[in-house]
Amino acid sequence: MELEKRLELYRRAISTWGVIPQVFMLYEETGELAEAMAKYMRARYDEDEVITELADVHIMVEQMASMLNFNKFEQEKERKLLRLEERLDKDTKKE
């Protein structure tokens, strides 16, 4: 789904269910992801179950960012990715 359509969908969700319930949904989804990862590490969940929870969390994170400032969110994400790349490049040079 293209970005503008996703952002409109997020606006609809927030308008329909409200900010506070959607924030609580973020809490719920992140808890489910943490539980899925723990079970995956113990070989009690498979990859598909974890992927489902990752997708739920990703959607909720984008939804929260859309309530604040999605462009700033994307810029900060890019800044942190570049920082990660720099750190990895430094660590690779040490080897």
Image: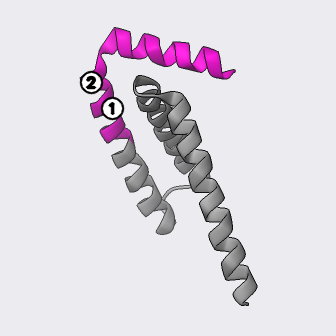
Where residue 26 sits, quadrant-wise, is: top left
Of the pair 25 and 20, the residue shown nearer to us: 20
Magenta-span inclusion, residue 13: yes
Magenta-span inclusion, residue 82: no
Identify the residue shown where x is 45% and y is 36%: 61
Q: Are marks 2 and 1 in contact (CB under 8 Å)?
A: yes
The residue at the far left in this view is: 20
Compared with 82, 51 (above or below) is above
Where the N terminus falls, by quadrant?
Answer: top right
Q: Main secondary structure of the magenta part?
A: helix
Q: Position of residue 95 (x, y in %)?
A: 73, 90
Of the pair 11 and 55, the residue shown nearer to us: 11
Q: Secondary structure at mark 2?
A: helix
Q: Is residue 52 visible?
A: yes
Identify the residue shown where x is 33% and y is 32%: 25
Q: Position of residue 17 (x, y in %)?
A: 32, 14
Where residue 6 sits, quadrant-wise, is: top right
Q: Which residue lies under the disc numbered 2?
A: 21
Q: Position of residue 50 (x, y in %)?
A: 53, 50
Residue range corresponding to the magenta coloring = 1-29
Disc 2 crowd rating (10 Å Cα; few below 14, some 14-19, many 20+) is few
Q: Is residue 48 visible?
A: no
The chosen color scheme is one colour
For badge 2, the amino acid type reads Pro
Identify the residue shown where x is 62% and y is 14%: 5
Q: Which residue lies under the disc numbered 1?
A: 25
